[in-house]
């Protein structure tokens, strides 16, 4: 049985204040869990989804996530392998950054510090150099963090809305028309919009746009495709429209997300 599948069990048994775990082929499961430590994740290769009871977050290649201690979550990945570099921390600074789940660009200084910690991966004994280095990393984190990327989708509570979202995701490559979606579920567009926003807090059009951008980030992170092919796969006929929408949502152009 793969040890990495049960990282929460292993980590919670470690008595150190900080624990490093780098895994070149992370094994995911659908188990809900939490850690008594906060978790910094850097995706070296691949792409990961983080699920909480009411949100789904995308963590792209070469980006970081901070998961605060005690937060119930599970993880998944659309393709494998996924190379994760994780640092678990039981003591952090009294800063708002450490109290929320954040997905963010990885500044170069932070990336190099994370890569440097590979020498301590799965080391369960105390090491003074590791302790001092990770203490410095804790201080660096809030200083290098700029803003959390809005790569997050609300999770529906209403099964009927969940069915609508399944329909939307299955038709992501199409130019989705709201009246057509409503007709598919025997609803008026106005009623469907009201039910949708009531359940997940955003409009149907807003959800469609956000889902298309998140799916595009996933494809750009793992497929090696160009911007044009990804634009088509998420339902955009115009590359410029796709690029502008992408920029308006994330603040970067899609070509900046392509992994070499």
Image: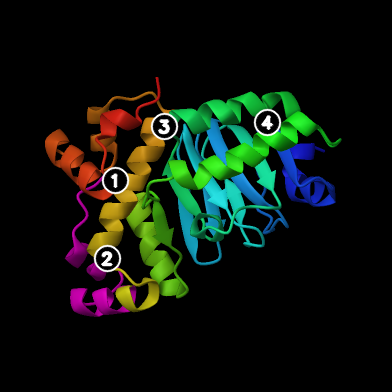
Q: Given contact means CB atoms under 8 Å apart, are the residues at marks 3 and 2 in contact?
A: no
| Residue 104 visible in this rendered orientation of the protein | yes
Where residue 45 sits: x, y (%)? 53, 28
Using the numbered discs, state the Cα–Cα distance from disc 1 to disc 4 in whole angstroms: 28 Å
User: Which label is found at residue 23?
Assistant: 4
- Tell me the SS state at disc 2: helix
Using the numbered discs, state the Cα–Cα distance from disc 4 to disc 3 in whole angstroms: 18 Å
Using the numbered discs, state the Cα–Cα distance from disc 3 to disc 2 in whole angstroms: 26 Å
Between label 3 and label 2, give the one nearer the viewer.
3
N-term mark: 1 or 3: 3
Q: Quadrant of residue 26?
A: top right
User: Which label is found at residue 101?
Assistant: none
Q: Which residues are magenta?
A: 171-196
Residue at 36% of width from left, 32% of height from top? 220
N-term mark: 1 or 4: 4
- Tell me the SS state at disc 1: helix
Using the numbered discs, state the Cα–Cα distance from disc 1 to disc 2 in whole angstroms: 19 Å
- Tell me the SS state at disc 4: strand
The residue that mark 3 highlights is: 221
User: Which label is found at residue 250?
Assistant: 1
N-term mark: 1 or 2: 2
Left or right of 80: which side holds 102? left
Between residue 123 and residue 22, name the one nearer to us: 123
Residue at 62% of width from left, 54% of height from top? 74
Residue at 38% of width from left, 35% of height from top? 219
Within-10-Å neighbours for mark 3: few <14, some 14–19, many 20+: many
Using the numbered discs, state the Cα–Cα distance from disc 1 to disc 3 in whole angstroms: 15 Å
Within-10-Å neighbours for mark 2: few <14, some 14–19, many 20+: many
Between label 1 and label 2, give the one nearer the viewer.
1
| Residue 171 visible in this rendered orientation of the protein | no
Where residue 92 sits: x, y (%)? 63, 52
Where residue 14 sits: x, y (%)? 83, 46
């Amino acid at each position: 049985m793969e040890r990495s599948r049960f990282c929460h069990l292993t980590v919670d048994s470690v008595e150190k204040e900080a624990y490093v775990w780098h895994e070149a082929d992370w094994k995911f499961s659908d188990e809900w869990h939490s850690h008594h430590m906060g978790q910094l994740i850097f995706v070296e290769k691949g792409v990961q989804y983080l699920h909480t009871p009411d949100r789904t977050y995308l963590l792209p290649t070469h980006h970081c996530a901070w998961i605060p201690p005690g937060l119930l979550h599970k993880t998944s990945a659309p393709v494998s392998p996924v190379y994760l570099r994780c640092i678990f921390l039981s003591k952090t600074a009294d800063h708002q950054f450490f109290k929320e789940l954040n997905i963010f660009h990885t500044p170069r200084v932070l990336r190099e510090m994370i890569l440097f910690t590979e020498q301590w991966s799965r080391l369960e004994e105390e090491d003074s150099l590791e302790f001092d280095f990770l203490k410095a990393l804790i201080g660096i984190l809030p200083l290098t963090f700029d803003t959390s990327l809005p790569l997050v989708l609300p999770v529906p509570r209403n099964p009927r809305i969940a069915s609508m979202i399944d329909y939307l995701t299955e038709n992501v490559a199409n130019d989705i028309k709201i009246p057509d979606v409503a007709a598919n579920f025997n609803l008026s567009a106005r009623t469907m919009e009201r039910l949708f926003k009531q359940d997940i807090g955003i409009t149907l059009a807003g959800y469609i746009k956000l889902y298309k951008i998140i799916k595009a980030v996933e494809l750009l992170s793992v497929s090696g495709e160009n911007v044009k092919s990804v634009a088509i796969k998420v339902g955009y006929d115009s590359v410029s429209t796709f690029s502008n929408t992408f920029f308006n949502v994330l603040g970067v152009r899609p070509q900046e997300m392509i992994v070499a």
